[in-house]
Image (cartoon, helix red, strand yellow):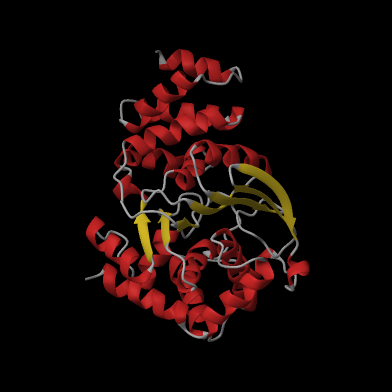
Amino acid sequence: MNISKILYKLSNNLNLTSNEANFVFTQIISGKLSEIQTSGLLMALATKGETVQEIIEASMVLKKKSKKLKVGKNILDTCGTGGDGKETLNVSTATAILTSACGIKVAKHGNRAVSSKSGSSDVLQELGVNINADLKKVKKCLDEINICFLMAPLYHSGMKNVANVRSILKVKTIFNLLGPLVNPANADMQLIGVYDKKLLLPIAKSLKKLGLKKAWVVCGENGVDEITLSGKTFVIELKNNKLRKFVIDPNKVGLKKSPLNKIRGKNPKFNAKEILNLFKNKNTNPFFKDIVLLNTSACLVIANKAKNLKEGLILANKNLINGNALEKLNKLITISNE
C-alpha cells in the first residue's frame, strides 16, 4: 500500500478499509513514517472523523504490539480521552483512587499531558507515586492494594514514535481515543469520558466489538470529558453486550450544579495539592469533592458495587471521609517506590 494514496483518500473525506487502517497504524507504531507523514495522517483522520472500524484497527495494532499485565478479570479503568481543553483538576485520577478505596480493583491507564497542563502521570508523580515502576511492582500494587498505575509509554513502546508529533500538534487526534481502548491489564470495566458528544457512540461500539464486559462512555455538556456538575452528562452504557443511552442530571442525584471554573486546575503541583486536600478532608474544594464523588459513584454502579448513583455517592463519601482514599494513595506511593 502507498501512504500518499491513503493521504489523498483521507483528504477527500473517504473512510479507510480495515486493511488500510491496519497498514497505516502498523507503519506509524513501527516508526516507519516521517513525522510529516504521521502528522498528515492524524490530522486528515481527525478532520474527516474517525470511524468505528478505523478506531478498532488502530487499537488492535496497539494491543498486538503492547506489553501485557496479566491480572485476571473484574478490573476497572477510568482513563478518558482527555483533550477537552477545559484545564480542570485531575478528576479521573482522584476518582480511580477513591474507587479503589471502595473495594474495586482499578488499573489506571494514563500518560503525561499532551493537550492539557497536567496529565494523570504528571499529577501522580507530583504526589510521589513511581509512575515508571516495573511490571512486578505494578502487579504487586494491584494484587495487594487494589490499584496500580499503568504508564502508557512503558507498555506501548510504539507510542514513542508519535509522542513528538502529538506534543507539537497539541490537538486532539485518534490517539486520544485509543488510550481508553488499550489498557495493558485488559480492564473489562470502564468509565470513559470523551471530549465530544459525537464520539459517544463510536467509542461505545468499539468497546462492544472489543469484548468489554461493562462500561459507561460519558460526555458532559460543553464537551467535558467527565460526568460533570456544570450541566447534564450524556451517557451510553455497555452492558450485557447491549448499548443504552441516558442522561445524568446532578440535581436529580442530590448535587448542586456548578460552573466549570470552580474546578479549574493549573500545573501538576497545584492539582496534586487539591487531591491531597480532598483526601485529607482539609481545605477541600467542595466542587472538586462533589465531581469526584459523582464519578466514583458511577464506577461503583459499573462494578455492581452500588445499585444507583445515589447509593454510590453514599459509599464513595464514606470511604473519603474515613481516610480510606488517603491510605490507598499512601500505600500506592510506598509499594510503587519499593
Instruction: Please state the total of marks drawn on the protein image.
Output: 0
Q: Quadrant of residue 12?
A: top right
Q: Position of residue 242 (x, y in %)?
A: 63, 42
Residue 179 on image: x %, y %: 45, 46
Q: Quadrant of residue 296?
A: bottom right
User: Does 282 sit above or below residue 122?
Assistant: below
For the point 72% across and 73% down, the residue is: 255
Q: Residue at x 50, y 73 (%)?
A: 102
Quarter placement of the N terminus: top left
- The image shows residue 79 at horizontal and vertical percentages of 49, 54
Q: Position of residue 328 (x, y in %)?
A: 40, 75
Residue at 36% in and 66% down: 125
Determine the residue positioned at 63% across, 77% down: 314
Q: Residue furthest front?
A: 240
Instruction: State the residue in front, 29 or 183.
Output: 183
Above-or-below relation of 296 to 24: below
| Relative depth, front residue between 258 and 149 | 149
The residue sitting at the right extreme is 252
Q: Is residue 303 left or right of residue 337?
A: right
Q: In the image, is 335 to the left or to the right of 210?
A: left
